[in-house]
């Protein structure tokens, strides 16, 4: 799910802790992708491969020839039960991991859902405050999605959301987090990105979306977004609400065309009452 044009914030903005040590990695941007498991196939083989009686007797310092037929039979039954329980535990563990991924993934697009996004935003805010690092959150709202649904059908609207999700996902760094916050709202957490860098990145992403209309049943459907941004400070809710308010000012000021004008950081953090869609 990649696009040809990829714009990334430079490596000079990679997030590191004091002394150059890299912090714990945030949630993967594609929440539905399973994380690599240590050991890979060898772990699965170790779980499923049954042990021989000789393996067990060698551990306890016995000679297999010293075991009576009854003991050998009982030990064989016990080993089979242990192997069954180990396979069942492995299946349960994989099922839990699968359910955890589902709990964090949006139901339509392969991004973090709002719950997972806010959780990661809280982590990033805490990390930035603890180590004196910078970071920003971007808030995107899709323009005219209702018109797309009304004129072309809800399948086209879903395809438009998928296209925008793909563009956002393909054009941020591995250390950044992309999520769907609501029906037509997306968020991006930019690790180690100050306000100027975040504003440039938001404008770049908006331009990429505007330059990639959706081809739907032989028709070209234009896409655009309004956006707001906020440096990471206070709480996750504070930062997200401030970015939401800044997005609304952008939406009103650009006539919902997705222009690149953006209020100053002071305006972005102003305590206005957000207008809900």
Image (cartoon, rainbow, N blue to C red):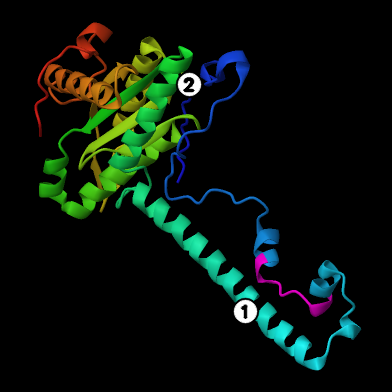
Q: Position of residue 68 (x, y in %)?
A: 83, 90
Looking at the image, which residue is at 32% across and 45% down? 162
The stretch drawn in magenta includes residue 87: no
Count residues near mark 2 (Cα–Cα under 10 Å), then give few for <14, some for 14-19, many for 20+. some
SS for callout 1: helix
Is residue 133 visible to the viewer in this orientation of the structure?
yes
Is 137 on the left or on the right of 86, as rendered?
A: left
Which residue carries the number 1 mark?
81
Residue at figure coordinates x 80%, y 79% from the top left: 53
Q: Secondary structure at mark 2?
A: loop
Span colored in magenta: 47-54
Q: Kindly tell me whether residue 222 is visible in this rendering.
A: no
In this image, 220 relative to 208: left or right? left
Q: Residue furthest bottom?
A: 69
Rendered position, 86 above or below 31:
below
* Residue at the spot 12% in from the left edge and 24% down from the top edge: 274
Q: Is residue 56 left or right of residue 139?
A: right
Tag in front: 2 or 1:
1
Residue position for label 2: 9
């Amino acid at each position: 799910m990649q696009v040809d044009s990829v714009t990334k914030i430079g490596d000079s903005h990679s997030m590191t802790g004091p002394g150059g040590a890299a912090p714990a990695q945030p949630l993967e941007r594609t929440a539905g992708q399973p994380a690599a498991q240590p050991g890979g196939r060898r772990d699965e083989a170790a779980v499923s491969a049954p042990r021989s009686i000789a393996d067990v007797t060698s551990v306890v310092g016995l000679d297999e020839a010293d075991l009576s037929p009854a003991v050998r039979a009982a030990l064989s039954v016990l080993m089979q039960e242990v192997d069954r329980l180990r396979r069942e535990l492995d299946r349960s563990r994989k099922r839990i991991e699968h359910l955890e991924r589902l709990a964090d993934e949006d139901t339509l697009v392969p991004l973090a859902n709002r719950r997972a996004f806010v959780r990661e935003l809280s982590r990033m805010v805490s990390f930035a405050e603890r180590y004196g690092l910078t970071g920003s959150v971007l808030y995107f709202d899709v323009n005219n999605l209702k018109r797309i649904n009304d004129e072309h059908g809800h399948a086209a609207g879903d395809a438009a959301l998928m296209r925008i999700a793909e563009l956002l996902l393909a054009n941020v760094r591995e250390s950044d987090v992309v999520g769907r916050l609501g029906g037509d709202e997306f968020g991006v957490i930019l690790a180690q990105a100050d306000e100027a860098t975040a504003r440039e990145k938001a404008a770049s992403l908006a331009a990429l979306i505007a330059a990639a209309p959706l081809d739907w049943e032989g028709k070209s459907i234009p896409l655009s977004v309004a956006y707001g941004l906020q440096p990471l400070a206070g709480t996750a809710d504070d930062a997200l609400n401030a970015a939401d308010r800044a997005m609304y000012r952008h939406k009103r000021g650009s006539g919902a065309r997705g222009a690149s004008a953006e209020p100053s950081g002071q305006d972005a953090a102003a305590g206005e009452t957000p207008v809900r869609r």
